[in-house]
Image (cartoon, rainbow, N blue to C red):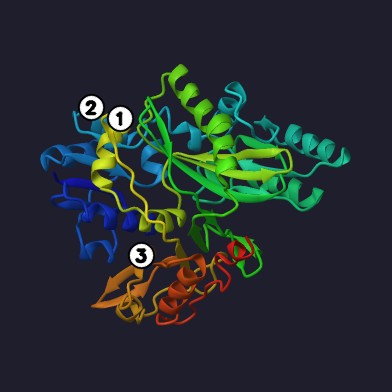
Amino acid sequence: MDILLIGSGGREHAICHGLKKSKLAGKIYCAPGNPGMAKIAECVNIPSDNESIAAFAAEKNVGLVVIGPEAPLCQGVADAVRAKGIPVFGPSKAAAQLEGSKDFSKAFMMKYNIPTAAYASFTDQESAENYVRSEYAAGRGVVVKADGLAAGKGVIVASCLEEALEGVRECFSGAFGNAGYRVVIEELLEGEEASILALTDGKSIIPLVSSQDHKRQLDGDKGPNTGGMGAYSPAPVVTPELLAEVQKSVLDNFLRGIQTEKLDYRGIIYAGIMLTKNGPKVLEFNVRFGDPETQAVLTRFDGDLADTLLKTANCELDKAELVWSSDPAVCIVLASGGYPVSVDKGHEIRGIEAAEADGAIVYHAGTVLKDGKLLNHGGRVLGVTARGRNIEEAVKNAYEAASRISWQGMQYRSDIAKRAFNR
């Protein structure tokens, strides 16, 4: 069958790479795709509205549409394509509110007894500021979140009262567009984070192998938050006992919730988990694969990805066979100079072929071809990913590959997955 994949980032390149290996895959269309994906698929420019995407899928008679990013899910692309009778991997617009609205998501968690931080939601600035002051007066820190999608921004982890108040003002000032006109204020949770991704077709829910992201820009988890500077899988902090607890308190309750609310959810659910002293709590839900966790997780997937996603789309997840390599995988994100504050782009990238010579995979994220040259064009540019017989070897392989790539201003962390060594 032919497949249409929506998206252009490192996550989508990793999905495309997995789909390409499938015995079911015919031609793969990527909209819009990127230079890395163009080597294994056909990149197409389709208008991003629901009707145009659905019409293209019908015209090309594709057998499966896979939606990568959150924005098209929240705008209802899955609904439009399903209306044409085409299987879609991705939740409906109504179900995508679990990421598209933090207020909706928190209310859902509370209703279905999914452990999460205490919160309050506000539509006026004065009430929000008064709530923040009362929380700090009681000795509790807060996290300020714009309610809607804010392109990975809109979350302020405040270190003091003034930072929290400034976060509230930033949201209501329009800095995040319409996303910030409702503000969710949560208690500040402390602990170690882990990422749990699970497939669900609305009837069953199956977790993938564990992973851990590195959000801060600099070594030692210092510097500003980013979209993610690297990831590794598995995450030793997610023990079998912990995963069993997350299955019971988070995933099973999530499945019960979408069934009760009659939400059409056929895709991936990503639970960002904080491992607190009081047990695991959900920081947020994402309604799609994480980035860069996907690059590490799918590099370990030895099953048939197209078959698995198709069975999920057709509500036959219980028939899917998930096969995982025992080898750990590590993804090192190579970013542009200035990221995450700004992007110094337009510089030629060298060394990708050398990086892939010994088995590493270089997933493209923020690249562009211009006059025959590959240039950096985004904040996070490449995801250098490698497996190894153990986590130390996977780290060594990934960093050796990364060291062969260069462009002006390139930056990356040197301690990805080091947290796992002590475990």
Residue 308 is situated, as x and y percent measured from the top left of the image, at 28, 41
The reply to whether residue 93 is in sight is: yes
Labelled disc at residue 163: none
Residue 41 is situated, as x and y percent measured from the top left of the image, at 19, 58
Instruction: Give the quadrant of the N terminus.
Output: top left
Q: CA distance from mark 2 to mark 1?
A: 6 Å
Instruction: Give the quadrant of the C terminus.
Output: bottom right
352 up-or-down from 307: above or below = below
- Dot 3 or dot 2, earlier in sequence: 2
Left or right, 361 with reference to 165: left
Label 1: which residue?
A: 79
| Residue situated in front as seen by the camera: 227 or 126 | 227
Label 3: which residue?
A: 363
Label 2: which residue?
A: 83
Q: CA distance from mark 3 to mark 1?
A: 29 Å
- Dot 3 or dot 1, earlier in sequence: 1
Of discs 3 and 2, which sits in the foreground?
A: 3
125 up-or-down from 169: above or below = above
Q: For mark 2, give the secondary structure.
A: loop
Residue name at image x 41 percent, y 23 percent? 263
Given the image, on which type of amino acid does mark 2 rest?
Ala
Circle 1 crowding by C-alpha within 10 Å: few under 14, some 14–19, many from 20: some
38 up-or-down from 86: above or below = below
Given the image, on which type of amino acid does mark 3 rest?
Tyr
Residue name at image x 30 percent, y 30 percent? 79
Q: For mark 1, give the secondary structure.
A: helix
Residue 284 is situated, as x and y percent measured from the top left of the image, at 57, 40
Residue name at image x 36 percent, y 78 percent? 355
